[in-house]
Image (cartoon, rainbow, N blue to C red):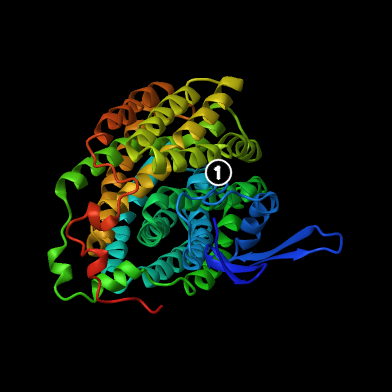
Amino acid sequence: MVREVELAPGRFTLDEGPFRYWDRTIATRADGGTEETIRYRSAAPHWGWLVDLATRRPVRRGLADGSSPVWCPTDRLTPRDAQVLGLCATLSVVAGFLGSLITQTMTRIADDFGESLCDQTGSLAIIRIGAVVTLVAAAAADRIGRRGMLLGSLVGSAIASTLTAIAPSFAAVTVLQLVSRGLTAAAAVLISIVVVEEIPAHSRAYAIGLMILPGGLGVGMVLWVLPLADLAPWAWRIIFGLSALAGLAAWASARRLPESERFEHDEHVPHERERQHIDLRRFALLGLILFLLNLFTAPVQQLQNDYLNQVRGFSATKTSVFLLLTNTWGFVGIAVGSQLADRRGRRWAAAIGLLGIAAGNAVMFNTSGWPMWAASVVGSVVGAVLAPALGAMLPELFPTLRRGAANGWLTCVAVVGSATGLLTTGAAAGCSAMPSYGSAMNLLALAPVVAVGLAFFLPESAGVELEALNPDDPEPDDRPYTSTT
């Protein structure tokens, strides 16, 4: 966790570790005993208080040389690493909030405008066209930098969602959310790229997991305010109005984020852009996995509220309670998946997660009462094991100056899977006031099961430097440029 250097007899300070400062003194008491005093502050912006709280007990009890708490990353991080993780965690909260607004409110918006289930699935499928926006923004980050595009994407998404609050029609909501969701997806891609490029090789899945957790907090924030939708048919607009605050948070955080050193280095190497290419085999495998995954998860995520509302008769408040009580436990799967992906490999973690997503969610849509609640918990916890592994592989398996474009195109493929799944579910479940979800979800649940086998054809990237995974990238020792950011 920390490596110290001795300043004077009995006085130690930070040599390496994720702290802004670290001071440890050992003094001799009058009775002949010794007294140890440690003062420290985490270097992580916004979240440092939480890190300091978590480290209080292990620091007080003491750790053997070379050891760290089980929740720590495998590698010893630097103050810069902590700064990047802290700021990206805040940006993940914003992305999670903005990205889940339409998911959690669509059924209320449709009721307000008098739209059917088919109208909902059609709108959600059209919103997926925002993947074009994601592609453009992610590819632009390969040329102008990660930080600028991350800032522009989240602020732009917040503006579009704020305007949704005054949308005059269902069509206007669809168009504005097409832009907002596209930019939010670009921000999520860029956050993953930044942490993968900055964090040491044995802790990249850990870092991705850390980004997922605050993203889930952002989703939870929407659920906190979702009961406002019960105040009146139009009250969903209040929830979208809160996007303005999210935009201010994104602006304040992204401006402090340092640019990726790998990007700055490669950008300054002559002819480096021309020699870096996307590995088409890796792209095809990842694309097919994402297509199959989203073929199932998009209907689960987007239509779960409608299922609870129309089929199970849940109010907005009861829906919020259900989602909070069953999805909150996903942090357990993320924590386990992060360590499993870094220490045992990405592919096994991905396989476990894919099977959990398929089994848990399929059962949820076919049951009621406590089995429905239990199945949702299984889908959330076991399914969450997938997120750190897949989230790390997507940026890891492509070279630096093609990383944004490759992930942008993969997002487009995932969106095609999402739209296909939504339209298939709408057609199979029916467009009546009481749609039948069970058979449709059972059929689509086969898709992530097939994806399990495909994951084992990908190269194992756990603990491998990005330059070793991508021969087109220059070796770290060959870097003539060092960032001064």
- Across and down, in percent, residue 264 comes to 30, 73
- Classify 204 as above or below 301: below
Q: Is 294 situated left or right of 359 in this image?
A: left
Rendered image quadrant of residue 4: bottom right
Q: Amino acid at mark 1?
A: Val
Task: Give the residue displayed 19% in from the left and 43% down from the top.
Answer: 284
- Dot 1: element: loop
Pick whichever, 260 or 225, lies toward us: 260
Identify the image quadrant of the N terminus: bottom right
Task: Give the residue displayed 52% in from the left and 45% down from the top.
Answer: 104
Task: Give the residue displayed 27% in from the left and 65% down from the top.
Answer: 476
- Classify 257 as above or below 286: below
- Residue, far front: 32
- Residue, far right: 31
Identify the image quadrant of the C terminus: bottom left
Pick whichever, 349 or 34, lies toward us: 34
- Classify 106 as above or below 194: above
Tell me, yes or no, if residue 31 can be seen here: yes
Q: Residues within 10 Å of mark 1 (few under 14, many from 20)?
A: few
Q: Which residue is mark 1?
A: 70
- Classify 465 as above or below 324: below
